[in-house]
Image: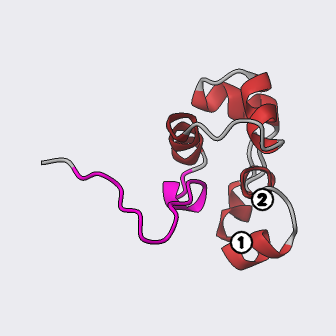
Amino acid sequence: MPNTARNAVSNDIIAASGLNPLKAARETRGYTIEELSLTCGLAVGEIVDMEDGKDADPAKLRRIASALQMPEEELIRVPAGENRPTQQ
């Protein structure tokens, strides 16, 4: 089970670790890949691919961010000057 006491770790520490942001966030929150897979409903292989930088599907990243209880903007980087579409 994830160690929720580690949820408060600073994002600066995660970024400084040199890990893929997804992998760093997952490990910081105490999840194994298998636990995250069960929590967000994605296959283990899909998560491994994303951590290896092979897949950056925003819909999948949103599911993971939700499962990790973190803002999706921490996993989904929007290039400067590019706005996300808004709902009306």
What residue is at 78 percent from the left and 76 percent from the top? 13
Which residue is at the front of the view, 72 or 66? 72
Q: Is residue 43 magenta?
A: no
Q: Is residue 44 visible?
A: yes
At which x and y percent is residue 76?
A: 56, 54
Q: Amino acid at mark 1?
A: Val
Which residue appears at 77% of the width and 24% of the height?
44
Task: Give the residues in magenta.
Answer: 69-86
How many neighbours does mark 1 have within 10 angstroms: few (below 14), some (14-19), or many (20 or more)?
Answer: few
The residue tagged 1 is: 9
Instruction: Label 1, secondary structure: give it.
Output: loop
Q: Nearer the viewer, residue 41 or 4?
A: 41
Earlier residue among tags 2 and 1:
1
Q: Position of residue 14 (x, y in %)?
A: 77, 69
Q: Which mark is residue 23?
A: none
Q: Residue furthest front?
A: 81
Q: Is residue 17 above or below residue 26?
A: below
Q: Amino acid at mark 2?
A: Thr
Colour mode of the rendering: secondary structure
Above or below, 82 relative to 61: below
Give the percent coordinates (x, y) of residue 74. Answer: 58, 61
- Residue 42 in the image: above or below residue 16: above
Q: Residue at x 29, y 51 (%)?
A: 85
Instruction: Tell whether 74 sits left or right of 88.
Output: right
Please identify the residue farthest to the left as the structure is shown: 88
Q: Which residue is mark 2?
A: 28
Residue 10 shows in this picture: no
Q: Are marks 2 and 1 in contact (CB under 8 Å)?
A: yes
Q: Is residue 86 left or right of residue 14?
A: left
Q: Position of residue 3 (x, y in %)?
A: 75, 52
**Mark 2 crowdedness (10 Å alpha carbons): few <14, some 14-19, many ≥20:** many
